[in-house]
Amino acid sequence: MNFRPTRFFWLVATTLLITTVLWAGANQDSLLRASLSPWRALAQLAGLWSTSTAILALLSIVRSSAMEFFFGGLDQAVRLHRKLGLAALLLQGGHVLFMTIFLASRGVSVALALVPEASNVRRLDIVVAYALLLLGALAYGRWLRHEWWLRLHRLIGLLFLAGIVSASTLNGVTQAFEPLRTWVVILFLLGSVAWIYQAFLFRAYGPRFRYQLVTATLRNHDIVDLLMRPTDKRMMYLPGAFVFLRVPGFKGSNRELHPFSISSSPNERELRLSCRRVGDYTEQLATLASLAPNQTRDLDLYGPFGAFTPHHYAPYRRMIWIGAGIGITPFLSMVAFERGNQDFRRIWLYYAARSPEDAVYDQELKDNIARADSLID
């Protein structure tokens, strides 16, 4: 199996390599004399690698087209964010473990090593590590509501930044070596900008488009189509892209941005989102179907995002598309776009649903496939 490194791979590898080389420079005398305790070395490296991966995790979800270039689209970046965040938390746990073993090897009891105040050592970074491990266990569990999950993630990012400040100001390997401290400061600034933009500035300064709801249609018991038209400038997007939707006035979710794939063709003036009712937010979306014909609802769309588009895979002339349930939505956009694409491809489309009643887009797909320029089975 051939391994083809992606831009994301090189980004992570380069970041960790720079961090490791600068750590080695900070410990060059101890390394040359072979006097550096392996447990202390592991503790230092785990802490620095945790910092590096945490910053990359923050950058991966900054919702910027520039960052999408490095992570292969925001859809892929979100998946990588989860892996990077988990790696940062595990490395933070390793930092605590290795530091405890190192102190124990120097005659400090394990109990005192795990309680910094009792050992008369001011170690705010260890306290932050405890908080991160606790919040991380909550965040990676599946028992939190989506709104609380989002808030917890913002707090975890803030704690990582606080830990970086603590680690870079205490007397230690980072503080003692100027190039390493400069590198950590650069990472801190990048992470801070990403966190502030994501938490506070995106709603005001992100790529926002104002739309007005035309119709909200219940396709079956749990799928709703939102058809909308622009009130000002129209969003230009590629088939398969997704957007973040905000519905002003939603109870308890007025500020929430929820991602949905676009299910309409870019050639159409009106934009459609197809959503499945699986939570509080989408339950409220379904209530829009009860609006009277003369009632209007303003919507905010942020985007477009994602690289899951046929254009991203332009060199490939034969493609297999697989969609199950509501996962068919990006392919609805792609198939509809094929009606006027004039770029012949051979495509095999597989659409799975739990029952014939759940295959609500079956006829739409058949109609568009019959009119498509590409050959689609």
Image: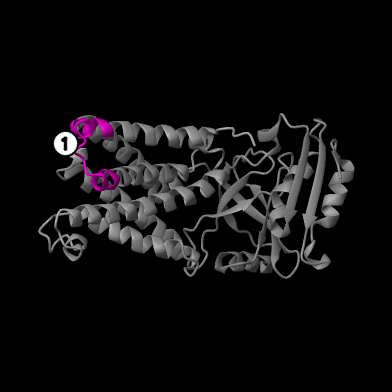
Tell me where residue 276 sits by quadrant.
Answer: bottom right
Tell me where residue 268 sits by quadrant.
Answer: top right
User: Mark 1: which secondary structure?
Assistant: helix
Q: Tell me the residue that label 1 is attached to.
A: 176
| Rendered location of residue 24, percent (x, y) | 27, 33
| Rendered location of residue 23, percent (x, y) | 27, 35
Identify the colour scheme used: one colour
Residue at image location 64% in from the left, 43% down from the top: 241
Task: Let me know if residue 200 is in the magenta part.
Answer: no
Q: Residue furthest left?
A: 120
Considering only vertical position in the picture, is 171 above or below 22?
Answer: below
Q: Main secondary structure of the magenta part?
A: helix
Judge the density around disc 1: few (<14), some (14-19), many (≥20) Cα neighbours within 10 Å: some
**Can the viewer see residue 376 in this picture?**
yes
Residue stretch in magenta: 24-43
| Rendered location of residue 40, percent (x, y) | 23, 46
- Tell me the quarter of the image containing the C terminus: top right
Residue 255 or residue 369, whichever sits in front: 369
Residue 42 or residue 335, whichever sits in front: 42
Tell me the kind of residue under disc 1. Ala
Residue 241 or residue 81, whichever sits in front: 81
Residue at image location 79% in from the left, 34% down from the top: 341
